[in-house]
Image (tube, rainbow, N blue to C red):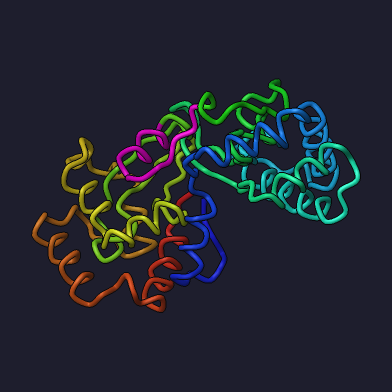
Amino acid sequence: MTSTSPLTLDFIKARAEDEQIAQVNFKQVKLTKLHLLPWLKEIEADMLRLRQSFDLSFDRTQTKGGKPYPEGFCQEITLGVKNLLQQELETAKTPGMQAMRNFIAQGGLAKRIWGNLRNQYFQNAFQFGSLYVDVANDTVVATKPKVEILPISKARMFPINDYDGYADLAEKYWKGQVYPNRVFPDLAVMFPMFLVTSDERVELHSNYQTILYRNMQFDFSLSERFLFKNRRRNNHIPESYLQKLVDSFDAEPEAVSDDVLTSKFEAARQSKLRFDSTRCQALLDRAIALKIK
């Protein structure tokens, strides 16, 4: 869940807006019904074909968390299929692709989304009008069909708008434990939590653009609320991990007080940190580097 792309306010805003689940209005329902539903089987067949094409192009010897492809690769698969889809739409030849092109030409919404799927997973998918289209449906349970298409109202895909919900899902999805970041106080305004996974990896979270942007958009109130009001606020990262962070990254040897954290949030707001892409980039680079395996 890290990024190597340059962090600018425009970049993270675009990424967040790209991933945000859109409200379905009457126009999108009408366009979906007119252009997509009559060709749903053909569209599903085309999406499966694109997914299979991506599978053949991808290095399937890669693993994530010790699990083989496709488990855990929902982002890579969805982005890869998105690129293939965009290429095919330029010269749409199949009935499914022609229906998709007509839908978009008439103002139909077609975008990638990311969020909380059924309170069980972080998931990347597509939203086509009023449809949820998942081309990485087998990335948690490998025996599931590769492609799933549902009315988005029935998909149970929810936006992630705060760190409380992110932390709850992170513990369930990665089978780990979340701890508040009180040992790197200068990073806490942007990166308020650690995740310790079941295989003993430790990372700062979240340096993922959607929630990162929302936190900046609200002047760090999301991270502040997590650090001071979340039920985990008094949990301390285990000593064995803390010592490694002290030795390798000069972490504070013990959790800092509420007063220290409060002063960091006050300083961030007074200095208008959220508008300073240079300082934000430096913090992001540090957060990405803070990993123990």
Q: What stretch is highlighted in magenta?
A: 156-171
Q: Name the quadrant containing residue 97.
A: top right
Q: Does the magenta-highlighted stretch encompass residue 120?
A: no
Q: Looking at the image, which residue is at 24% across and 46% down?
A: 226
Q: Judge by depth and name the residue closer to the eye, 118 or 142.
A: 118
Residue at the (22%, 77%) spot, across then down:
271
Q: Is residue 80 above or below residue 47?
A: below
Q: State whether residue 269 is above or below residue 45.
A: below
- Residue 123: image x %, image y %? 55, 37
Residue drawn at point x = 21 percent, y = 53 percent = 224
Tell me which corner region of the image, top left, top right, bottom left or bottom right, holds residue 139.
top right
Q: Magenta span has 170?
A: yes
Q: Nearer the viewer, residue 83 or 39?
A: 39
Tell me if residue 68 can be seen.
no
Residue 66 at what x, y percent from top left? 62, 36
Quarter of the view holding residue 190 = bottom left
Question: Please, is residue 251 above or below residue 97 in the view?
Answer: below
